[in-house]
Image (spheres, coloured by chain):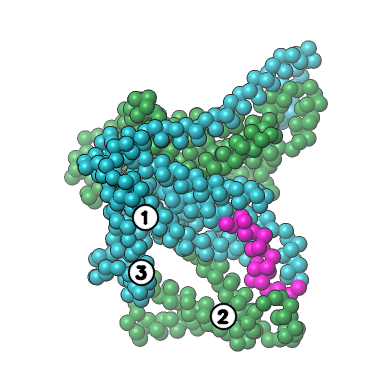
């Protein structure tokens, strides 16, 4: 690209004043764009609050503790079951996704040859590019039927743990559940955690790794002593960004979760719900108060994800790691 | 355990396992699993794979422990773990793409791509996604027309002018914005555009929500590319008396153009499959509706979502074909972006 030539000889010195004006206009324009980002985030918060207020004033029960969702009818509704289901499914997803994401990040950076590692990195990122509605469709028609065996197995052998216990019976009673949603969520947040961990692990000083190897450390000892400790802040924030994504995931969860309103730690039994899935599933039939109530629940989700993201970014910024992954 | 304690017990002549021995152990372990499945009631392909993986890892680790000692055994266990993690990552990718192609291929025809759902009865297997493709393309194009110029300006401010606390704050907020759930962006546009301004459902409302999601991705990639432009180019331009704004527009942006295009394509690939905002503010429509500024408009993601929730197997089949269409668009965008990166002299590291 011949970048330097155009326009250069078109600026004689006497144009200095007009060019200074050009500078002012242009920098003003970019500043306005930047300010718009501030305004946008503020506007999101304000409009969600304003449109949530009618429903909150109309609420005949306690918003935080009610486990029913009937804003248009009896006017009784609350987010207790939704918040519980959102947090439970996301945490369960992290338990499954984090070890795998760290393993694949370590493999692509430290074990695989350089070229293969880059290719595997692309493939992992591809997992983040699959639209969530496709994950939902796939989860509903492929994953859920194939998970039944695992659910029966977990219930039979690990049923003494409350998480996997609860009402059980024949194969047919396992269907749309928190467990299925968590598996889908784990697949969806895995590439995000893996991508950031990959970047962070790749930034470790090679001299540290070579020093560990020179002292006779095996590859695992090198990873444990020289790679993971300096990467820890980056990995922690990667996990939190993954958590933020899992908390807010809508369509995939809406298709594979039971859409019920109860607080139950039995993740294998049919049921469960999340804030986002509830919005997607109830929006079509909601009246004006119903829509307002859904916006109120969305406001709760916004605040939760905002806090998680702020914390994650704070950890990244403080550690001084450059994180510019395209998967996030 | 520190590296030092292990070193003393390990002399140069200590025994080690050669590759053929490890290979033989793996083959033996798999054969043993076969035998196990032949004589016991265990069955099923998935169960076999899980059992084989466990037995192979246990055999190799045990063998290493016996011959090479504890440290080597732990190391080999970690290597197996990393490999297993890779397999567990690639499996869902292969199964999602593969199963979507398998289920979608039968209905994925020229007629499916060129017909809408207008006048298609509940028992008819006809109909297609033409109207949804039009809607999706229009909505994403409009979203990009908003998000790309705005994102570029923000990126320019952050890199060229914002070396102050305001610039740092914007960078931070943009990073935080990447974490806004798509349903929240949809709810915001619903509250602001549809409810407060009484604009009603339209494709453009969907574009607004998609633009909110696209903006931070565009800013982040453009920012990175602008930072990669060599300072020497800028200084040469200033030395010739070119003002800053012209330097940015004529020197910096053209140099970073390839990288910025890559970023925009990835951003488009990310938002083109967003269903939640479209569900809330665009509504649905079975007909070809080319005006994105008024009335509900169909879109590919919503088409898939509604088909998935339908009790009719015909709708489900069409949903799979539409999902295949959507994935193909995303993959094309994704691969094109990667190919473009290869030609990008700035990003080649």
Q: Residues within 10 Å of mark 3 (few under 14, many from 20)?
A: few
As drawn, the label of residue A255 is: none
Label 2 sits on a secondary structure element that is: helix
Q: Name the foreground residue: A285 vs A3.
A: A285
Reply yes or no: does residue A287 show up in magenta: no
Answer with left or right where residue B178 lies relative to residue A221: left
As drawn, the label of residue A85 is: 1
The tint of chain A in the picture is: cyan
- The magenta segment is A215-236
Q: Is residue B308 visible?
A: no
Residue occupied by mark 2? B61
As drawn, the label of residue A162 is: 3
Label 3 sits on a secondary structure element that is: helix
Answer with left or right where residue A39 lies relative to residue B238: left
Q: Main secondary structure of the magenta part?
A: helix
Count the numbered circles shown. Answer: 3
Instruction: Please provide percent x and percent y for residue B303.
Output: 32, 42
User: To which chain does the residue with label 3 belong?
Assistant: A
Residues tagged by mark 3 and mark 2 found on one chain of the structure: no
Q: CA distance from mark 2 to mark 1?
A: 39 Å
Instruction: Please provide percent x and percent y for residue B10.
Output: 72, 84
User: To which chain does the residue with label 1 belong?
Assistant: A
Name the residue furthest right.
B239
Label 1 sits on a secondary structure element that is: helix
Q: Which chain is green?
A: B
Q: Quadrant of the N terminus of chain B?
A: bottom right
Instruction: Please provide percent x and percent y for residue B254.
Output: 66, 31
Q: Name the foreground residue: A304 vs B28.
A: A304
Please state which of the two labelled residues, at mark 2 or mark 1, is closer to the viewer.
1
């Amino acid at each position: 690209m011949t970048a330097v030539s155009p326009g250069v000889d078109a600026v004689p010195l006497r144009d200095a004043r007009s060019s200074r004006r050009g500078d002012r206009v242009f920098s003003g324009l970019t500043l306005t764009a930047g300010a718009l980002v501030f305004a946008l985030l503020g506007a999101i918060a304000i409009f969600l609050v304003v449109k949530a207020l009618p429903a909150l004033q109309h609420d005949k029960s306690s918003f935080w503790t009610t486990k029913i969702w009937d804003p248009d009818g009896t006017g009784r509704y609350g987010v207790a079951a939704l918040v519980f289901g959102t947090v439970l499914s996301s945490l369960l997803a992290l338990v499954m996704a984090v070890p795998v994401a760290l393993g694949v990040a370590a493999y692509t950076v430290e074990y695989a040859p350089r070229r293969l590692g880059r290719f595997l990195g692309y493939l992992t990122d591809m997992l983040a590019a699959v639209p969530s509605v496709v994950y939902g469709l796939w989860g509903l028609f492929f994953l859920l039927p194939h998970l039944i065996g695992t659910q029966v197995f977990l219930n039979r052998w690990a049923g003494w743990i409350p998480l996997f216990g609860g009402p059980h019976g024949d194969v047919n009673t396992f269907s749309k559940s928190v467990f299925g949603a968590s598996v889908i969520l784990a697949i969806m947040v895995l590439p995000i955690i893996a991508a950031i961990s990959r970047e962070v692990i790749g930034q470790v000083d090679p001299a540290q790794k070579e020093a560990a190897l020179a002292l006779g450390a095996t590859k695992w000892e090198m990873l444990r002593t020289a790679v993971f400790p300096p990467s820890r802040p980056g990995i922690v924030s990667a996990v939190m960004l993954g958590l933020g994504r899992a908390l807010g995931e809508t369509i995939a969860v809406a298709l594979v979760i039971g859409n019920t309103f109860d607080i139950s730690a039995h993740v294998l039994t049919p049921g469960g719900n999340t804030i986002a899935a509830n919005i997607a599933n109830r929006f079509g039939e909601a009246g004006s108060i119903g829509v307002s109530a859904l916006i109120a629940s969305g406001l709760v989700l916004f605040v939760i994800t905002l806090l998680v993201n702020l914390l994650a970014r704070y950890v990244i910024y403080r550690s001084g790691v450059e994180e510019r992954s395209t998967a996030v | 355990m520190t590296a030092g304690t292990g070193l003393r017990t390990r002399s140069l002549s200590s025994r080690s396992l050669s590759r053929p021995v490890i290979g033989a152990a793996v083959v033996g372990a798999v054969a043993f699993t076969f035998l196990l499945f032949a004589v016991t009631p265990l069955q099923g392909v998935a169960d076999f794979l899980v059992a084989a993986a466990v037995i192979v890892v246990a055999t190799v680790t045990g063998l290493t422990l016996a011959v090479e000692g504890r440290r080597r055994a732990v190391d080999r266990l970690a290597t197996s773990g990393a490999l297993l993690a890779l397999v567990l990552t690639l499996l869902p990718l292969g199964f999602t793409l593969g199963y979507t192609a398998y289920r979608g291929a039968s209905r994925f025809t020229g007629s499916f791509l060129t017909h809408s759902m207008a006048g298609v009865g509940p028992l008819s297997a006809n109909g297609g996604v033409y109207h949804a493709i039009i809607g999706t393309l229009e909505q994403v194009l409009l979203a990009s027309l908003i998000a790309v110029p705005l994102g570029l300006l923000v990126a320019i401010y952050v890199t060229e002018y914002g070396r102050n606390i305001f610039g740092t704050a914007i960078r931070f907020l943009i990073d935080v914005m990447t974490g806004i759930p798509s349903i929240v962006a949809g709810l915001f546009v619903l509250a602001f555009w549809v409810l407060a301004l009484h604009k009603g459902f339209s494709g453009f409302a969907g574009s607004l929500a998609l633009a909110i999601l696209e903006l931070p991705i565009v800013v982040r990639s453009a920012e990175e590319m602008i930072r990669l432009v060599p300072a020497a180019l800028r200084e040469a331009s200033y030395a010739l008396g070119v003002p800053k704004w012209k330097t940015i527009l004529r020197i910096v942006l053209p140099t970073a153009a390839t990288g910025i295009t890559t970023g925009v394509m990835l951003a488009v690939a990310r938002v083109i499959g967003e269903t939640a905002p479209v569900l809330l503010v665009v509504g649905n429509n079975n007909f070809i509706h080319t005006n994105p500024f008024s009335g509900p408009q169909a879109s590919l993601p919503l088409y898939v979502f509604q088909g998935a929730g339908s009790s009719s197997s015909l709708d489900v089949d069409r949903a799979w074909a539409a999902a295949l269409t959507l994935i193909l668009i995303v993959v094309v965008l994704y691969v094109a972006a990667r190919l473009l990166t290869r030609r990008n002299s700035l990003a080649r590291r």
